[in-house]
Image (tube, helix red, strand yellow):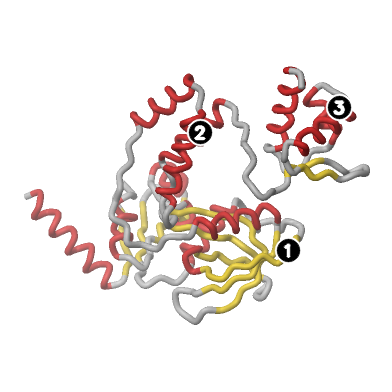
Amino acid sequence: MTSDTTARMLRLLSLLQTRREWAGLDLADRLGVTVRTVRRDIDRLRELGYPVDGTRGLGGGYRLASGADLPPLLLDDEEAVAVAVALRTAAGGLTGIEETALRALAKLEQVLPRRLRGQVSALQGAVAGITWEDRGPRSDPALLAMLAVACRDHEILTFDYTPRHGATAARRVEPCHLVSSGRLWYLLAHDLGRDDWRVFRLDRISAPGPTGRRVPPRPVPGDAPADFVARRLSAAPTRYRAVATVRVSAGHLGAHARGPAGRIRPVSDDTCLVDASDDSLARIAQTLAALGTDYSLDADPDVVRYLRDTATRTLRAVD
């Protein structure tokens, strides 16, 4: 195989890894060759063990299918650096992900070109993470991966779900999007049994099962999935109620305060409400402290008592 053919096949493999399916004509245009040459290169990839599926006809094309083993991935310089840094600072909230990420990082660093290894080392040396003791719920990375594929393929899923209050029940849903909030992960899906949109916490999902049935994507009502989830979470029943009235506009507070946009509700041009209600008194205090401005508070007695005790301890500490 000549060097030109090898380079072209590597480019072809890279293209197949960036999109779910390619039309033969599109691949030929990208590679600057004929459709016939693309077919020959696809056959060569198959001989090398790459599982490339093809369909004939007007809407036909090629896709890199899943095989028995993970095929080599081709990454450009920016992609390789991004993956290495992401592995180094692997997302929290997933059981056992840190050790798995470090194993994958060790394999990647062995094959990184010297010019990229220096960039990754510099980034790792300059970036440090803070590890807090975490006793909160953690999600299964295998479940996260399964749900991500179902969202991408618009495949109906079944699973058992245990709500905060109530018994475990079977659900059948059309998955739409995964949303992370802090160390918690949520699935936004259309619940077929209830004919309505629902938000499911991943750590409360069990016994997931793909059905093999794919459906057209269902648009999320109103806005972006993350904003929709934030609003649903803020409207969900909580153990403690706490609503702050802030004398700034909702737009100003949303741009300067830390917290989900779904918690902020405009009242007038210079006033908004912030729903800090939560199951945790400590998280309510954190939400209110992050406002960074004065406010009045309408809250349950337990919240008021907790805030007063916290403020008293703080004043004693700085006196």
Residue drawn at (59%, 71%), measured in percent from left and top? 159
- Callout 1 crowding tier (Cα within 10 Å): few <14, some 14–19, many ≥20: few
Q: Which one is closest to the eye, mark 1 or mark 3?
A: 3
Would residue 249 be visible to someone looking at this image? no
Residue 63 vertical position relative to residue 229 in the rendered view, above or below: above
Q: Identity of the amino acid at label 2?
A: Ala
Q: Identity of the amino acid at label 1?
A: Gly
Q: Is residue 218 left or right of residue 263?
A: right
Find the distance from the CA under tag 2 to the CA under tag 3.
33 Å
Secondary structure of the residue carrying numbered label 2: helix
Residue drawn at (80%, 35%), measured in percent from left and top? 42
User: Which disc is residue 76 wearing?
Assistant: none
Q: Quadrant of the N terminus?
A: top right
Residue drawn at (45%, 54%), measured in percent from left and top? 181
Q: Nearer the viewer, residue 22 or 14?
A: 14
Q: Which one is closest to the eye, mark 2 or mark 3?
A: 3
Q: Identity of the amino acid at label 3?
A: Thr
Would residue 164 be visible to someone looking at this image? yes
Q: Which residue is mark 2?
A: 82
Residue 238 vertical position relative to residue 295 in the rendered view, above or below: below
Find the distance from the CA under tag 1 to the CA under tag 3.
34 Å
Q: Mark 1 vs mark 3: which is more N-terminal? A: 3
Marks 1 and 3 close (CB-CB < 8 Å): no
Q: Is residue 161 left or right of residue 90?
A: right
Secondary structure of the residue carrying numbered label 3: helix
Find the distance from the CA under tag 2 to the CA under tag 1.
33 Å
State the image coordinates of residue 222 (x, y, percent, origin top left).
63, 55
Q: Which residue is mark 3?
A: 37
State the image coordinates of residue 289 (x, y, percent, origin top left).
29, 52
Q: Which residue is mark 1?
A: 212
